[in-house]
Image (tube, rainbow, N blue to C red):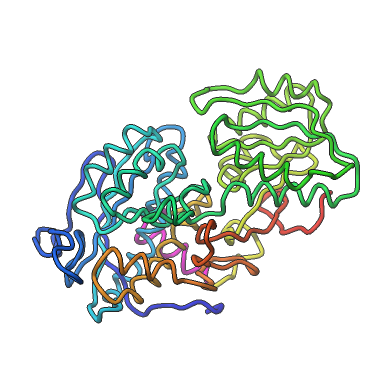
């Protein structure tokens, strides 16, 4: 089992549509556990002796619907598989199934905050939702309400700072970690490189650029020749790519979060006859959704970072974890084809990590859950690449902080230790 723990029981799941919330008939109408922590050890909202309910607000429509849909599908698949075996035995001795209520926020912060308000009194914890601005929109409310915002899909370090965010924990590596990994690889090449930077004009882009610059600082073989930004509301970055192409850079560090804009950037560069090597974030570097439509094979190298096995990679064609995952994704996640986005794998890992916390929490309370979650260390969740693990014990770091750099091979990615 590749070193990770596998519960023999399964969680039930009921997923709401993007427009409405529905509760499973199994315990969904019970008043038990809906009244908050009225006494020490009393159940928090969203948990009974038989069920626990999780909420997700994530983009299920719009430009980020592909990865957003994956953030629900992976969790559905993981807990659906567990459901077939009867449920999870929690640390308090009760065996429970999990219900999931998922709402569409279209990657709009205002809608995400409204979704949270709709879900907060019915769920035990919020989880897995995609997006920095959308998760930030209700972070302070979750703190005030003492509702866990656990294992969410953002690399913003504020969510992994327990002093600032006592009810939060990010899942994916912080943006600075990814940017630093790119910078270290390039600086270690020993060759002269001219770098152009295009980043999203917010905490997402700033974090990536901060990490990259810190890694190349003092490297006399790296020159940043041009640096531009774009807004998350933009529909094209053609003007920025045209300007960057005139810089004669041989490498572009492209810290972009929107899949259509990354595809458009790759296509525009080719139209201009500019073929640098690319560094792309982990969440916008999908071979099927980004590189194939963007014509990634035209470039000498496209690099990204990862901590998850990619089902499309020939190296994992016979991998037991991957086969189990793909089977469950089709059967329980309503995802019959191998996913184009890594977020499906990530949210599968989120499900496994939540299970670890559930089995350790000694009381049916949000406090006990957060304590158990923050105690997880050295957990090799299913689908994790060698050299990576879940460690929620490091202040200032998310549940996953380790990554490996990979290079596009025309179908998937190969792990590399050098640039070129």
| Whole-percent x, y for residue 194 in the image | 84, 34
Q: Residue at x 79, y 34 (%)?
A: 195
> Is 11 positioned to the left or the right of 64 in the image?
left
Q: Quadrant of residue 244?
A: top right
Q: Residue at x 76, y 36 (%)?
A: 298
Q: Is residue 328 magenta?
A: yes
Looking at the image, can residue 322 be seen? no
In this rendering, is residue 81 above or below 329?
below
Front residue of 239 and 70: 239
Front residue of 409 and 366: 366
| Whole-percent x, y for residue 271 in the image | 73, 23
Q: Quadrant of residue 124?
A: bottom left
| Whole-percent x, y for residue 15 in the image | 27, 53
> Is 27 positioned to the left or the right of 58 in the image?
left
Q: Quadrant of residue 332?
A: bottom left
| Whole-percent x, y for residue 14 in the image | 24, 57
In this rendering, is residue 18 above or below 76?
above
Front residue of 137 and 196: 137
Front residue of 110 and 405: 110
In the image, which residues are magenta? Answer: 321-335
Q: Residue at x 20, y 72 (%)?
A: 41
């Amino acid at each position: 089992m590749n070193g990770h723990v596998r519960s023999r029981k399964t969680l039930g799941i009921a997923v709401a549509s993007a427009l409405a919330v529905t509760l499973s008939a199994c315990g969904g109408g019970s008043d038990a556990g809906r009244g908050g922590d009225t006494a020490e050890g009393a159940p928090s909202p969203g948990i009974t002796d038989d069920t626990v309910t999780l909420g997700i607000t994530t983009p299920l429509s719009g430009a980020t619907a592909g990865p957003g849909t994956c953030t629900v599908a992976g969790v559905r698949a993981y807990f659906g598989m567990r459901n077939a075996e009867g449920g999870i035995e929690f640390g308090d001795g009760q065996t429970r199934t999990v219900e999931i209520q998922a709402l569409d926020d279209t990657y709009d912060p205002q809608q995400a905050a409204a979704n949270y308000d709709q879900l907060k009194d019915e769920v035990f914890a919020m989880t897995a939702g995609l997006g920095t601005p959308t998760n930030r929109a209700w972070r302070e409310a979750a703190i005030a309400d003492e509702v866990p915002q656990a294992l969410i899909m953002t690399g913003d370090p504020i969510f992994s700072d327990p002093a600032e965010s006592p009810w939060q924990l990010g899942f994916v590596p912080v943006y600075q970690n990814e940017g630093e990994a790119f910078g270290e690889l390039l600086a270690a090449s020993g060759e002269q490189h001219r770098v152009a930077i295009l980043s999203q004009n917010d905490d997402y882009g700033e974090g990536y650029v901060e990490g990259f610059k810190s890694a190349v600082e003092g490297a006399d073989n790296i020159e940043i020749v041009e640096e531009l930004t774009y807004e998350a509301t933009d529909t094209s970055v053609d003007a920025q790519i045209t300007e960057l192409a005139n810089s004669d850079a041989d490498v572009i560090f492209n810290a972009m979060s929107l899949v259509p804009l990354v595809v458009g950037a790759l296509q525009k560069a080719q139209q201009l006859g500019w073929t640098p090597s690319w560094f792309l974030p982990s969440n916008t570097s999908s071979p099927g959704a980004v590189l194939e439509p963007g014509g990634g094979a035209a470039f000498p190298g496209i690099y990204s970072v990862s901590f998850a096995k990619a089902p499309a990679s020939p190296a994992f064609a016979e991998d037991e974890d991957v086969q189990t995952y793909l089977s469950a994704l089709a059967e329980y996640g309503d995802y019959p084809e191998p996913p184009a986005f890594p977020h499906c794998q990530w949210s599968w890992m989120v499900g496994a990590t939540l299970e670890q916390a559930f089995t350790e929490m000694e009381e049916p309370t949000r406090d006990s859950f957060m304590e158990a979650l923050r105690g997880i260390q050295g957990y090799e969740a299913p689908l994790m690449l060698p050299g990576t693990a879940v460690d929620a014990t490091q202040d200032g770091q998310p549940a996953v902080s380790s990554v490996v750099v990979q290079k596009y091979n025309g179908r998937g990615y190969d792990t590399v230790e050098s640039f070129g």
